[in-house]
Amino acid sequence: MRKFWKSCLCIALSLIISHVVQAKEYNILDFGAKSDTTVVCTKAIQEAIDACNANGGGRVIIPAGNFVTGTIILKSFVELYLENGATLLGSKNILDYPDIKPDYISLRTQGTTRQLIYAENASHIAISGLGEIDGQGKYFKIMQPNAEGVLRPHLIRFISCQDIVVQNVSLRNSGAWMEHYLACERLQIKGVKIYNHCKINHHNNDGIDLDGCKNVTVSDVICDSDDDAITLKSTSPKACENITITNCVVSSHCNAIKMGTETTGGFKNITISNCIIKPSEYNDGDISGVKTGITGISLEIVDGGTMDGICISNVRIEGTHSPLFIRLANRARPYKEGLEVTQVGIIKNVSINNVFITSDEKIGCSITGIPGHPVENIHLSNIYFQSEGGGLKEDVYREVPEKEKDYPEGTMFGVLPAYGFYIRHAQNISVTGGETNTANPDSRPAFYLDDVVNGKLANLTLCGNESSEASVWLNQSEKITIQECTLQGTLPCFVRVDGAETRSVSVNGNILMGTKKLIYTNKVLNKLIRECGNIY
């Protein structure tokens, strides 16, 4: 038996060695490419790719120099390798990007598409090396600014591909999205540097878009984009599933890391860890969002679909108007003409831990569902948030519209009734450990809970001042526990309770030396509140 297995091992090793030996390099210079920006080398590069594929696979070499190309199609078992000093430039002529009709149907592939590097139904493909790919997107300014990239070429679009590696290359200045991976499996993006800004044509300039992909790792990426930076989408019935994003530095004028906008198939088993989110370094010309960014992390379900099993940890967020944004709504946009979205989606089982936030804006963070459809099982721990502050009393009493059919965006509600977290239509939610404070006096509470069932605030350090009526505000909520929190500063009241349906509130073990009154409520609600062991 031992001889049998030894024989099998020898055969396997010989096959691997044979494959390595057979793998060849195909230098595009040998196929007529020229390092001359007046020459378009599409034909030469495509011939090198085709020859590589026809001979069993290998590596297509882009040597040092500047090479211009239109659309090239990557094929199975082909690695596009850019040597140090190599720059692959997208052609400035839109006619060098022919219309391609993908086989796979999604929201954005029902018509034709244009892109610099394309693959569909391919496997074992790669883009690597220390060189650069520059889409020269600014030269497509005559195209419609919000054409979703259909009239402006994406840099990379892979559809229904498997076993993909994109590593170490620098990607710059796409006409639209930088990288779009649709319905792909077993994808690794590692060590890639992305810079996607154009002075004029800035709309839809995303960094990485993972769309209905499965088994993906994104690591060690540095991304600075005008539109959303690292985005998970579901523009077809396929969900984004089993995805890790780690060790990345991310900047965006819109949303730095986002799941959503399109959510048909949903999101399952996603982890985000060890990332830094900071303001974009680009400020030259128009931008599509805001200078410091709209959100740091956005989790959205608005077109049906389910979000389940999201773990976020060890993240630093600097800037952004609304650093954390969780949104369940019912825009109900179908991915295909003629279909109808009949069910509201679901957001559940989200864990966010060890997040440090500083924001120069006063909007605050929000976690919201819609009436009858709460977000569920949302657990935050060790969240340290310093807001700019400056909120007014009228912000607290302002009615926040539901906007369940609107485009989901962290700024959609305006200045929130809380400087820290506004939580509405939620069930089984907890915030434990951490601190919220403001750089300037703020009349809003740290937490505003509206229509929350089974909520817990514990081990928090909260700031207060005389202009604020309370540190925690409860409205139409039940089964709420507030325990072992510490108040810094002074304010008239620690907890304010409103709403005829508010009941079963427990306030215990809090250290509140600066508060004049523990709870403000009316007599009807007094019997529904229990407090013990508080120091104030």
Image: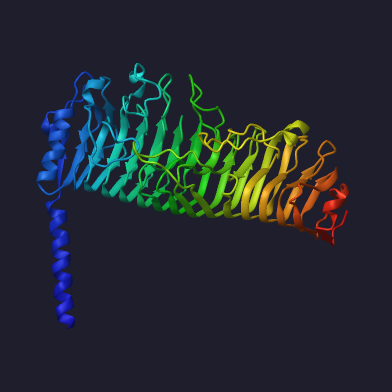
* Left or right of residue 24, residue 303 in this image: right
Residue 78 in percent (x, y) is at: 19, 45
Let me know if residue 132 appears in the view: no
* Left or right of residue 218, residue 19 in this image: left
**Residue toward you, 104 or 210:** 104
Residue 106, by quadrant, is top left
Q: Is residue 21 above or below residue 335?
A: below
Residue 352 in percent (x, y) is at: 57, 52
**Residue toward you, 425 or 256:** 425
Q: Is residue 480 above or below residue 357?
A: below
**Residue toward you, 421 or 45:** 421
Write the residue at 37% across / 29% down: 148
Q: Is residue 64 above or below residue 299?
A: above
Residue 41 in percent (x, y) is at: 18, 26
Q: Residue furthest top?
A: 142
Q: Residue furthest right?
A: 516
Residue 71, by quadrant, is top left
Let me know if residue 214 appears in the view: yes
Residue 374 in percent (x, y) is at: 58, 50
Q: How is the image coloured?
A: rainbow
Q: How many numbered discs, if any?
A: 0
Residue 437, by quadrant, is top right
**Residue toward you, 247 or 533:** 533
Write the residue at 59% across / 35% down: 319
